[in-house]
Amino acid sequence: MNIILIFIAATIVNNIVLTYFLGICPFLGVSSKIESAVGMGLAATFVMTLAATVTWLIYHYILVRFNVPFLEYVSFILVIASLVQIVEMFIRKFSPDLYRALGIYLPLITTNCAILGLTLFMVLREYNFLESIVFGFGSGVGFTLVLLIMAGIREELEFADVPEAFKGAPLTLIISGLLALAFMGFSGIISTS
Amino acid sequence: MSSVRLYMEFFKGFWKENPAFRQLLGMCPLLAVTTSVINGVSMGIAMTFVLISTSIVVSLIRKIVPNQVRIATFTIIIATFVTIADLYLRAKFPPISKELGPYVPLIVVNCIILGRQEAFAKKNPLYRSFLDALGMGLGFTLALLLLGAIRELLGSGSILGIQILGTWFEPWVIMILPAGAFITLGFLIALMNVIDQRLKRTA
């Protein structure tokens, strides 16, 4: 039960983009076409799930055991960067098709604050191993969902007549605000249970 | 000639290349911690500290770092200074550290800092990099301050915790919520665009 709750919370209620403002850069930059939103979302979900798994193991079996939790940030960022690199090499070798689809988005993910943010939240909330994996996967799904919605809206926006000053970033931000407002409607799902 | 340029190195961060409003970098702390002025400014100071320290170190070692591993090197330098800033905040200002939560460690992946190293510190001498980092850091702090002030004033009717608007004022709860952050920033950037257009027309 707890695990289902964590998944729903991470995907919809406490969406990583709309409530924690993580991963805003790709959200504003990439989400103008649906295809690229799907690619970015898939790549991010994959890396997020892996990153949550690996950093949990490192935090609990190395940093806590040897009593060096202050190395948390340095080690997490290194793990994420090398993870992305390994995943990239692995995919290129074993699935060239997938590599072509995800290719350019993978390196971008290293600097995606959503990944590091997710691992920090995981430590802060003291999730156990299984919960961390579900949390990582759920956040990835939530990120993909919002990226897709945004891409859909922006494709339609191309035909809209927008005042000069609001073109580009300002309008995207205001739409995100309205989306965040809409997602707040889901907050009842968890608090009542 | 060169003194004029030095002066520009410092001031470009405030308006022309303001990292928050112009380059749209560092969005996550900008939106997340600006629910009040004090949070925004503390974040700005932490960012400025990390940015200046990293720029100094990167500028000093710029000739000995091989090009292939530069990003990894910069990231580790940034992460080290962020750890210092985080531990300092936790020891000296526990309430603020608690409010900012994971957004202090998230400075590590803030694109402003890595961006300045790539765009500036790795190819410029020490004093120029220092001025650039100081200007960018203060420009970003200014953006945090502005956003924090607007959201605190409209969202709780106060500034720096002091009640400014009277009891007649019904706080706009939305300004404190995530949605308010997005919308306020959107309007601020639009306002900046309008001012720029006016300036261009008169020039």
Image: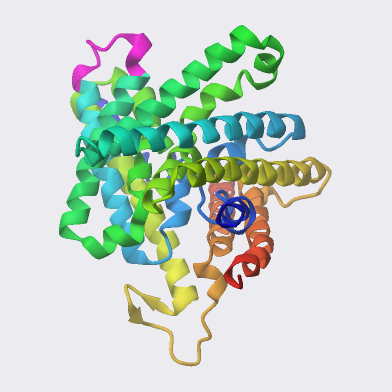
Please say if B12 is above or below A13.
above
- Does residue B133 appear anywhere in the picture? no
Magenta part of the chain: B60-70
Please say if B68 is above or below A87.
above
| Residue farthest along the front direction in this orientation | A1
Residue B11 in the figure: left or right of residue B25? left
Please say if A44 is above or below A99.
below
- Does residue B102 appear anywhere in the picture? yes
Image coordinates of residue B134 in percent, x first then y, are: 26, 40
Residue A42 in the figure: left or right of residue B113? right
Q: Is residue A153 magenta?
A: no
The residue lying toward the viewer, choosing from B68 and A155, is B68
The residue lying toward the viewer, choosing from B29 and A47, is A47
Q: Is residue B66 magenta?
A: yes
Residue A26 in the figure: left or right of residue A66? right
Instruction: Place residue B3 in its image quadrant.
Output: top left
Residue drawn at point x = 58 percent, y = 70 percent: A191
Residue drawn at point x = 64 percent, y = 70 percent: A188
